[in-house]
Amino acid sequence: MKRLSILFIFLITCAGAMAQQVQVEKHSKTPLAYPEFRDGAITFTFGTTKTYKADIFLKDASLIYKSGGKTLKASLAQVRSVTFGTDSFIPTGGRLGRVIAAKDSVTLTDVTTIDMARIEHDVETGKNSSFLDMPEFNVFIDTNSDYWGRDDSYIPLKTEYFFVIKGEAVPATEKVIRQRIRPDKKKDFKELMKNRFWSWKDAGSLKQLLEYF
């Protein structure tokens, strides 16, 4: 009985650790973050804020907006932040990253883009439709409406986490972040890495590191 109890506790512990580290597969029926263009408050680097009908193109997490009857791609070098309702985004290594949490000059973001490797794999295996690239907008237009009309159709997505430190996008990986930890927090960081319930793929876990920079 004692052995069974120990085994049960071990299995529960492993299951909890695995659940914490497994990423939920994301997908979308359109190559945009939102189903339709919506009001986006764009704050520029020179301080002005203007509202446009805008969206985020998921191929490269770029900002696209409507102006003068045209759909344009914004230069993120001139953008400080974008707000869609309760969602806030900031430039993260040349792409738009959703703000998860921030402390002082460090912001935790996630960047969601189309999983092109998965697309290519699905095309090779006959599971996906073809796309037509529009160079002037760098936007994909689906050429197979029958495919996307099916209930099981989807565009696979992937999410990457970053710490934006004074404007620099730093990938949320142990090898990179270890070099950025404050000297007085290195011991705490080492102990945190031993926590089997902590994960580099979990936003809740990553938030803890905001205290370590």
Image (tube, grey):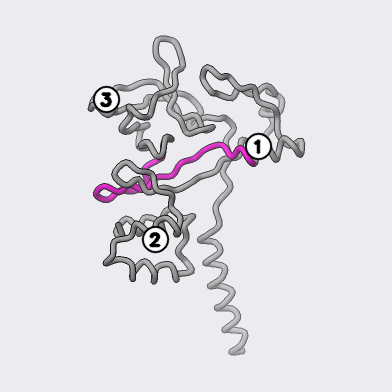
Q: Quadrant of the C terminus?
A: bottom left
Residue position for label 1: 119
Majority SS type along the magenta span = strand
Mark 1 / mark 3, whichever is N-terminal: 3
In magenta stretch: residue 105: yes
Outermost residue toward the front in this view: 179
Residue 194 quadrant: bottom left
- Residue 101 lies left or right of residue 144; in this view the side is left
Question: What residue appears at the point 44 percent right and 70 percent down from the top-left corner?
Answer: 195
- In front of the other: 146 or 101: 101
Q: Give the CA separation, mark 3 to mark 2.
A: 36 Å
Q: Quadrant of the N terminus?
A: bottom right
Residue position for label 2: 178
Going by the numbered disc 3, the residue's amino acid type is Thr
Look at the image and give the residue range highlighted in magenta: 96-117
Image vertical order of residue 25 relative to residue 14, above or below: above
- In front of the other: 157 or 147: 157
Q: Give the CA separation, mark 1 to mark 2.
A: 33 Å
Residue 198 quadrant: bottom left
Question: What residue appears at the point 30 percent right and 49 percent down from the top-left corner?
Answer: 106
Mark 3 / mark 2, whichever is N-terminal: 3
Mark 1 / mark 2, whichever is N-terminal: 1
Q: Secondary structure at mark 2?
A: helix
In magenta stretch: residue 88: no
- Residue 22 lies left or right of residue 204; in this view the side is right
